[in-house]
């Protein structure tokens, strides 16, 4: 039975959304295409009708998760754009850390990306650039452009690493897991509040 274009588009979207969730929960290498197809209510063959390989699906699933995370950073709250502190508090919250399926796609996949196809790595790099740009836009306007990007990139990488490390020790040492979130949150505040010219002064 021939599938309409509309139904085919819906099936493709369902596969991407399902793959994104399962790959966040279990890792890219921890879930197979057959399982993804079944969870999406589609056959193994239907999946390959939309994606030539698991790598192609993984790249699209990661892109979907990254776009979802990006919208969280830029969506207005109560009619205004969220301030940097609000974004940081949300990202480094215990709730967000504990909910892997709904959490940051980069934090969930960072340890695997280097072993994946270049197309997957390209999606990750784009997501990191987007996060960096958002943070840079929220820093003090007087911070020079070179320092702005450097600080924003440091923040983005610190956030991703904090969630990943906190999850890694959560079962064994929950207090350490919480300490990681708190320590990184405090450190990022220091980076964000650093006055203009501090870096140059430090080298004199």
Image (cartoon, helix red, strand yellow):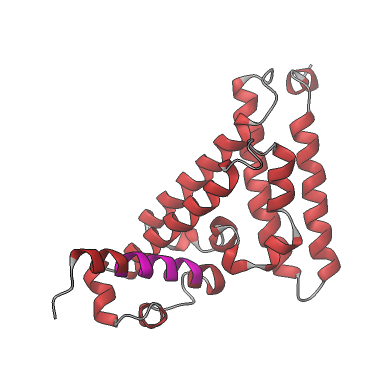
Residue drawn at point x = 76 percent, y = 34 percent: 191
Does the magenta run of residues contain 25? Answer: no
**Of 122 and 49, the residue lying toward us:** 49
Residue drawn at point x = 79 percent, y = 57 percent: 180
**Of 143 and 202, the residue lying toward us:** 143
Residue drawn at point x = 60 percent, y = 40 percent: 76
Find residue 60 and report its horizontal and vertical position in percent.
Answer: 37, 59
**Of 54 and 41, the residue lying toward us:** 41
Give the total of numbered labels: 0
Asked whether, in this view, residue 187 is left or right of residue 84, the answer is right
Residue 77, picture quadrant = top right
Above or below for 175 versus 192? below
Find residue 45 and report its horizontal and vertical position in percent.
Answer: 24, 80
Above or below for 142 versus 111? above
Find residue 28 and report its horizontal and vertical position in percent.
Answer: 47, 69
Q: Quadrant of the C terminus?
A: top right
Above or below for 175 versus 68? below
Asked whether, in this view, residue 74 is left or right of residue 91, the answer is left
Asked whether, in this view, residue 196 is left or right of residue 3, the answer is right
Find residue 39 and report its horizontal and vertical position in percent.
Answer: 42, 80
**Of 23 and 2, the residue lying toward us:** 2
Range of magenta residues:
11-21
Asked whether, in this view, residue 89 is left or right of residue 136, the answer is right
């Amino acid at each position: 039975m021939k599938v309409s274009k509309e139904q085919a588009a819906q099936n493709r979207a369902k596969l991407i959304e399902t793959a994104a969730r399962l790959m966040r929960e279990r890792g890219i290498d921890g879930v197979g295409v057959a399982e993804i197809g079944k969870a999406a209510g589609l056959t193994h063959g239907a999946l390959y009708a939309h994606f030539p390989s698991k790598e192609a699906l993984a790249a699209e699933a990661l892109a979907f998760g990254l776009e979802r995370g990006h919208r969280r950073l830029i969506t207005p709250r109560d009619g205004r754009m969220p301030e940097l502190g609000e974004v940081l508090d949300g990202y480094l919250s215990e709730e967000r850390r504990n909910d892997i399926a709904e959490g940051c796609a980069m934090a969930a996949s960072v340890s695997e990306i280097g072993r994946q196809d270049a197309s997957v790595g390209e999606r990750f790099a784009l997501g990191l650039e987007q996060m960096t740009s958002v943070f840079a836009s929220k820093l003090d306007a007087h911070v020079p452009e070179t320092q702005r990007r450097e600080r924003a990139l440091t923040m983005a990488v610190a956030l991703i690493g904090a969630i990943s490390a906190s999850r890694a020790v959560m079962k064994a040492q929950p207090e350490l897991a919480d300490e990681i979130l708190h320590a990184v949150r405090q450190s990022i505040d220091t980076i964000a509040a650093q006055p203009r010219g501090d870096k140059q002064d430090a080298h004199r």
